[in-house]
Image: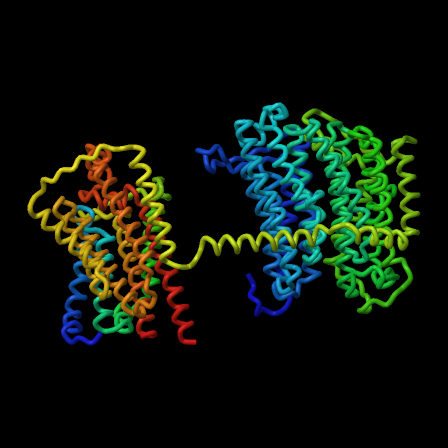
């Protein structure tokens, strides 16, 4: 797609989408949001980038293969789930700790895993479809 | 694991390591022998699936002890032998791994205390033996025979699982120790189904007629595998199970009738077939069948004599058969052939192999003072206590005489016959390949001379299998009695058969040519099964998306519609709604109409997107911002994906016939109607809020979060979410692979 308005606007939009997605991810535990929504927002951002500048450019901007991102997300979620084991809790039970007034938990790691897995899954699909389109079309 | 690039023979170290570990295991088992022979049972158990009453349990008693010692002891010798036999094979490391896994599975099988544990190890032996039989996987025959063994024993394994579940239901426990202690199941209404299923498992594993055909084919495996799996261990698993469950299922007409018939038929048929073989390894394979048949036959009985004979013969057979297989492998290794007609006079070139062969063959032929002689005497003593003693004694006599003849042909002729020049000039094999057969041969002699040493082992195994104390009596010289006379008759008949072997062979070959073979039958069965699978796949999987969607939506409409008609729920329709809601409804409806208008695909996709946004607006209106945002994002991404995929398709080539269009419209209307009515029926009921209340109360108190939706996703139901993530990623990677393949195909 060759649209000057889209490709110019996309640069701002992608940045905005990504920042917003992280914000949504982090606030998710107490306010509307969370890893799933955040992941979808980030994926939308990269999808816009892919439309505006082409898949190759979007892949470059992402730096990492989306399949790896998804796999790392799954690994994060798994680690978060298994963390409970050595501490004597049931698998996937939330583990909480407080450091310097900030509450941190395995739940957050799990949510980050969800975030990454969703980005990876959606972008794998979109990029592959776009690749196919560019090759065939 | 060593790679294929390492120097040939570099992986020998794995063979030695495995041999040492096996030896260590054997010593560890032997150290418990004192206690076990004193009647103690060592138990260990870990909870596995407590809600199902299944545990990972092990026990070592007198019966397990014999098997465990044979498995680990012979295993150590086999690993040593294999290192000499094929240590420079490029994939020897892989071979050792498979064989070692097999040994552990087999050990787990005989030590299992829980029926489900036993079954798992049972299946593991099937799988590992599949890998071992098909080890030379560049040969189509090896692959085919490995698959045959897997399907036959695996099929039997499924029957066995069903049988074990029934035993668990009937006895109220999967714990063997408890099942054995709770008395038999012979009077239980489920007895016959249990017996049938368990026997199916045992007979397929131990290659009893009519499932015998896979065992000779399994000789496609490298010789160390045959020596281990098909003499001492895997095929004995079925026999072990029968001996183990004898107190629980034995001593009925059904038990003894089936075992007698299958065992006797297998034993006699196999020994006749064995005489016909000209390949040494094939001949040994059939004598293994004979031995398995004999053991099964003697497990049919309920008398101490029969069981003593079965257990003793089992030990005798494991010792001499493993040795003979190793000898045949050594001959093959040294001369390049296993054909009996091309071999003779090897004793000069291979004196130590010849000695091992002579010792093992003497035990197989049942000559005094070998352990085989004692085994044979016990068989004749036990035969009288079996059902139809006359027929059984005659059958055992014939089988033993044929065994005597085969021992002479297989083990003596290649060494002592007329010297014949084999393909390679023969040479003596290395110490690794000599240690096993020599040691086992000497053991056969030693246990014969000092039978008292073996006596406590047999006694305690018989006691367990019989469920009553019995002191076995093993003697070289039991006096001038009927067994002694029968032994002499065996030797005479065996010598006659040996002298007339060529005539007999021709007669057997002519007779067999007229019988239908099991192996071609197996191939026909498999071909038919494949054709059936293909036919039903073509029927169900048309490969057209419109067919799948039609099936899905018709099913949905039917199930909902039938339920609605049967249940006749109360449907209250309230038309009062806020103007804003009416506006959104109109917007959504407009989207739906747009999706249907033919002509422009992009307009249709936009229409579907509009419907989704309308739904998201409704979510916002009812205070579910999380769901609304998700819905909005998902709709956006689906429109994007849809757009990429659909807009690149060629224009619609196929114009659907009006009849088909009408059908599709009908299905769409039916689904819409049924779903609408169902939702109306659901919202007409007052909402049950107790689950909502649980999450509202627990969200902050238990999970430290205020956003209930997120807390449910990442905490309360985190395991579900994890499963969903896996599915999402797998689906994406699967689609990626398909698209990439299509792209690659398009370029070609």
Q: Is residue A122 above or below residue B309?
A: below
Q: Is residue B462 above or below residue B436?
A: above
Looking at the rendered image, the quarter that the C terminus of chain A falls into is: bottom left
* Viewer-closest of B278 and B744: B744
Q: Which quadrant of the structure image shows residue B374?
A: top right
Q: Is residue B278 left or right of residue B503?
A: left
Q: Which quadrant of the structure image shows residue B425?
A: bottom right
At x 60% / y 53%, what residue is drawn?
B528
Residue B718 drawn at (x, y percent): 30, 45
Looking at the image, the residue that sits furthest to the front is B658
Residue B342 drawn at (x, y percent): 84, 64
Q: Is residue B197 left or right of residue A13?
A: right
Q: Is residue B709 left or right of residue B654?
A: left
At x 82% / y 47%, what residue is drawn?
B272
Residue B478 appears in the figure: yes
* Viewer-closest of B157 and B492: B157
* Viewer-closest of B100 and B445: B100
Looking at the rendered image, the quarter that the N terminus of chain A falls into is: bottom left
Residue B440 appears in the figure: no
Residue B28 drawn at (x, y percent): 63, 42
Residue B663 drawn at (x, y percent): 32, 53
Q: Which quadrant of the structure image shows residue B610?
A: bottom left
- Please name the colour scheme applied to the rendered image: rainbow
* Viewer-closest of B73 and B161: B161
Looking at the image, the residue that sits furthest to the left is B579
How many numbered marks have been drawn onto this rendered protein structure?
0
């Amino acid at each position: 797609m060759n649209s000057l308005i889209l490709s110019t606007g996309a640069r701002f939009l992608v940045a905005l989408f990504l920042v917003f997605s992280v914000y949504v991810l982090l606030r998710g535990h107490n306010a509307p949001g969370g890893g799933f929504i955040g992941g979808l927002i980030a994926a939308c951002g990269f999808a816009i980038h892919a439309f505006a500048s082409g898949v190759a450019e979007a892949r470059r901007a992402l730096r990492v293969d989306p399949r790896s991102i998804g796999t790392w997300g799954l690994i994060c979620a798994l680690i978060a789930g298994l963390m409970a084991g050595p501490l004597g809790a049931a698998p996937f039970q939330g583990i909480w700790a407080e450091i310097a007034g900030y509450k941190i938990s395995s739940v957050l790691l799990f949510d980050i895993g969800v975030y990454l897995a969703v980005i990876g899954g959606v972008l794998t699909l979109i990029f592959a479809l776009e690749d196919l389109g560019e090759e065939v079309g | 694991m060593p790679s294929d690039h390492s120097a040939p023979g570099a992986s020998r170290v794995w063979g030695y390591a495995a041999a040492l570990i096996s030896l260590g295991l054997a010593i560890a088992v032997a150290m418990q022998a004192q206690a076990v022979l004193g009647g103690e049972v060592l138990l260990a158990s870990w909870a596995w699936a407590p809600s199902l009453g299944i545990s990972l349990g092990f026990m070592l008693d007198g019966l397990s002890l014999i098997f465990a010692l044979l498995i680990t002891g012979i295993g150590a010798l086999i690993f040593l032998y294999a290192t000499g036999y094929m240590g420079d094979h490029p994939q020897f490391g892989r071979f050792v791994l498979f064989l070692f896994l097999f040994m552990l599975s087999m050990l787990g099988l005989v030590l299992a205390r829980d029926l489900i544990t036993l079954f798992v190890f049972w299946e593991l032996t099937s799988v590992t033996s599949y890998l071992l039989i098909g080890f030379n996987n560049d040969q189509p025959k090896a692959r085919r025979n490995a698959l045959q063994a897997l399907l036959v024993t695996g099929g039997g394994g499924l029957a066995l699982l069903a049988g074990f579940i029934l035993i668990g239901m009937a006895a109220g426990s999967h714990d063997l120790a408890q099942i054995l202690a709770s008395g038999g199941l012979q009077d239980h209404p489920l007895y016959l189904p249990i017996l049938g299923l368990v026997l199916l498992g045992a007979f397929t594993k131990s290659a009893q007629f009519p499932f015998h055909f896979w065992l000779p084919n399994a000789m496609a495996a490298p010789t160390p595998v045959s020596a281990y799996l098909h003499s001492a261990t895997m095929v004995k698993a079925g026999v072990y199970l029968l001996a183990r469950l004898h107190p629980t299922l034995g001593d009925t007409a059904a038990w003894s009738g089936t075992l007698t018939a299958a065992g006797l038929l297998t034993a006699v048929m196999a020994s006749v077939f064995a005489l016909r073989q000209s390949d040494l390894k094939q001949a040994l394979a059939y004598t293994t069948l004979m031995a398995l048949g004999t053991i099964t036959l003697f497990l049919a009985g309920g008398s101490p004599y029969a069981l003593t004979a079965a257990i003793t013969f089992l030990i005798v057979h494991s010792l001499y058969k493993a040795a003979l297989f190793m000898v045949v492998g050594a001959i093959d290794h040294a001369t390049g052939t296993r054909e009996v007609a091309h071999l003779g006079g090897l004793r000069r070139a291979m004196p130590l192999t010849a000695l091992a062969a002579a010792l093992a063959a003497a035990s197989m032929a049942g000559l005094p003072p070998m352990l085989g002689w004692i085994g044979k005497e016990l068989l004749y003593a036990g035969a009288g206590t079996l059902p139809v003693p006359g027929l059984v004694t005659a059958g055992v006599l014939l089988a033993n005489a044929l065994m005597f003849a085969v021992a002479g042909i297989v083990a003596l002729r290649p060494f002592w016959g007329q010297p014949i020049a084999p393909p390679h000039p023969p040479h003596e094999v290395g110490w690794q390949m000599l240690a096993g057969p020599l040691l086992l041969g000497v053991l056969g002699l030693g246990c014969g001379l000092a039978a008292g040493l073996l006596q406590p082992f047999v006694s305690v195994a018989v006691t367990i299998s019989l469920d009553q104390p019995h002191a076995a009596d093993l003697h070289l010289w039991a006096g001038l009695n009927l067994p002694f006379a029968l032994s002499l008759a065996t030797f005479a008949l065996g010598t006659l058969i040996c002298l007339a072997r060529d005539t007999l062979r021709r007669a057997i070959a002519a007779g067999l040519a007229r019988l239908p073979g099991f192996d071609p039958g197996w191939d026909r069965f498999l071909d038919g099964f494949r054709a059936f699978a293909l036919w039903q796949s073509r029927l169900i999987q048309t490969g057209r998306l419109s067919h799948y969607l039609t099936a899905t939506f018709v099913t949905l409409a039917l199930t909902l519609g039938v339920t609605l008609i049967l249940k006749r729920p109360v449907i209250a329709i309230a038309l009062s709604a806020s103007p804003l809601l009416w506006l959104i409804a109109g917007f959504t409806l407009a989207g739906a109409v747009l999706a249907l208008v033919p002509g422009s695909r992009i307009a249709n996709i936009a229409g579907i997107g509009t419907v989704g946004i309308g739904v998201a607006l409704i979510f916002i209106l009812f205070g579910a911002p999380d769901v609304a945002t998700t819905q909005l994002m998902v709709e956006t991404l689906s429109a994007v994906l849809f757009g990429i995929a659909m807009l690149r398709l060629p224009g619609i080539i196929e114009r659907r016939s009006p009849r088909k269009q009408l059908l599709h419209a009908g299905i769409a209307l039916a689904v819409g109607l049924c779903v609408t009515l169902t939702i109306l029926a659901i919202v007409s009921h007052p909402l049950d809020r107790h689950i909502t209340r649980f999450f509202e109360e627990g969200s902050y108190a238990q999970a430290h979060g205020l956003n209930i939706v997120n807390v449910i996703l990442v905490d309360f139901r985190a395991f579900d979410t994890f499963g969903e993530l896996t599915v999402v990623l797998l689906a994406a990677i699967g689609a990626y692979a398909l698209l990439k393949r299509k792209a690659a195909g398009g370029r070609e």
